[in-house]
């Protein structure tokens, strides 16, 4: 049985339904992420797991017990908030010890458990410092240590890295992965950052308008989105509307509006005439001044550079095809001494394998 089961949970605020019949499960030891835009219901769902909000209907089963209605302090759950919520007048060790004092843990056991968790988060040398004497990343680790010291079955993290700068955020992502492996506690993590979710998670629940739009491992969500929303929300993606015009043994032909015929992988139980969207990631597309036309299993088009965006390690090129449709491609800036390969209005050719994209039925 899963450690956590959310069964048909609904939460409304007046006429607004924040969480709409959500069901999912989280396994013990899993790094599970709730991902979605602002207002999608992810934080409300997290607050219900913590006990700060109560569901209007449905069940929240933790370790086989329905905790809906159980107050936060009675749940084997701790929450790490975005602002860390540390006591500024207490040292690191005192902040971490605070939950144990509230639970009347004996002094010797308290000292031992604080020392253990300080070692887990690599903060032993900082035990006597105050929060204002530490960096944002260190304060974040203190907040996690305080949440871990009571040995919760479930650790909830509400966008804990959003206040950090980009470099520190990346460092903390690696630390969170390593920490979660070391302590073995189940993490439920809330974020609106797609890259963060893909990097950290064992599984991701993408939420939209109070519902789970897709739940799967990161690579499946990225490569095989189930809807236009998921495809568009997770990273950069070309969304090309089309109609199925022919069905073969392992692939089908799709007429892309304003572009032409493109082959793609065959979907089960489809018919000629069905409409949908071909989702195509920019990095899956070849781009060059000229490309061979006779490469097997490739779709080939001509166009010109409409715009480009230099990002350091890569450049995003927006290509205008002959019929005016815009397609984003991506090239690594790997050539020595060159910032980018093409300029605006350069004539180019692009191609992609038939299995590079994923067709979503309307």
Image (cartoon, rainbow, N blue to C red):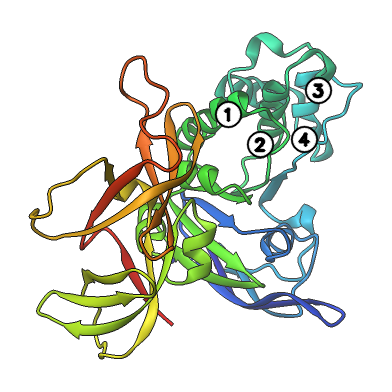
Mark nearer the N terminus (4 vs 2): 4
Q: Quadrant of residue 16?
A: bottom right
Residue at screen point 36% across, 59% down: 220
Query: Which mark is drawn over residue 94?
Result: 3
The label number, if any, that marks residue 172 in the structure image: 1
Q: Percent position (x, y) of residue 229?
A: 53, 68
Count of marks placed on residues:
4
Q: CA distance from mark 4 to mark 3?
A: 15 Å
Residue at image x 25%, y 90%?
272
Q: Residue at x 48, y 68 (%)?
A: 214
Task: Determine whether the residue tagged by mark 2 lies in a helix, strand or loop.
Answer: loop
Q: Nearer the viewer, mark 4 or mark 2?
A: 2
Do the numbered discs 4 and 2 sit on residues whose CB atoms are within 8 Å?
A: no
Q: Which of pointers 4 and 3 indicates the residue nearer the eye?
A: 4
Which callout, 2 or 3, points at the residue further toward the start of the chain? 3
Query: Could you say which is closer to the camera, residue 243 or residue 293?
Result: 293
Label pair 4/3, CB-CB below 8 angstroms? no
Q: Is residue 99 above or below residue 259?
A: above
- For mark 1, does the 10 Å Cα neighbourhood hold few (<14), some (14 to 19), or many (20 or more) residues? many
> Where does label 4 land, which residue?
84
User: From mark 4 to mark 1, how far is it between C-alphas?
Assistant: 14 Å
In the image as oriented, which residue stretches furthest toward the right?
Answer: 89
């Amino acid at each position: 049985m899963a450690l956590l089961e959310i069964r048909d949970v609904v939460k409304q605020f007046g006429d607004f339904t924040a969480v709409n019949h959500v069901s999912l499960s989280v396994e013990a030891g899993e790094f599970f992420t709730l991902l979605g835009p602002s207002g999608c219901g992810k934080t409300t769902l997290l607050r219900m797991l913590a006990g700060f909000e109560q569901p209007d209907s449905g069940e929240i089963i933790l370790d086989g017990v329905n905790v809906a209605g159980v107050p936060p302090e009675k749940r084997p759950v701790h929450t790490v908030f975005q602002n860390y919520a540390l006591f500024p007048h207490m040292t690191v060790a005192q902040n971490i010890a605070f939950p144990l004092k509230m639970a009347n843990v004996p002094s010797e056991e308290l000292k031992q458990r604080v020392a253990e968790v300080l070692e887990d988060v690599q903060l032993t040398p900082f035990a006597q410092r105050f929060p204002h004497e530490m960096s944002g990343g260190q304060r974040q680790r203190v907040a996690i240590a305080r949440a871990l010291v009571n040995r919760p079955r479930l650790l909830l993290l509400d966008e804990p890295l959003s206040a950090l700068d980009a470099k520190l955020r990346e460092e903390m992502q690696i630390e969170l992965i390593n920490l979660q492996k070391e302590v073995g506690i189940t993490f439920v993590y809330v974020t609106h950052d797609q890259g963060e979710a893909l990097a950290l998670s064992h599984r991701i629940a993408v939420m939209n308008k109070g519902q789970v739009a897709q739940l799967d491992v990161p690579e499946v969500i990225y490569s095989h989105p189930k809807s236009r929303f998921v495809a568009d929300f997770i990273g950069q993606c070309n969304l090309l509307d089309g109609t199925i015009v022919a069905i073969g043994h392992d692939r089908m032909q799709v007429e892309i509006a304003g572009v032409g015929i493109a082959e793609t992988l065959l979907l089960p139980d489809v018919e000629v005439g069905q409409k949908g969207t071909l989702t195509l990631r920019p990095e899956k597309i070849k781009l060059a001044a000229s490309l061979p036309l006779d490469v097997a299993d490739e779709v080939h088009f001509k166009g010109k550079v409409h715009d480009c965006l230099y990002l350091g390690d890569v450049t995003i090129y927006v290509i205008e095809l002959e019929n005016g449709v815009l397609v984003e491609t991506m090239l690594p800036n790997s050539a020595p001494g060159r910032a980018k390969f093409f300029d605006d209005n350069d004539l180019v050719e692009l191609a992609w394998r038939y299995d590079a994209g994923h067709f979503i039925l309307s």
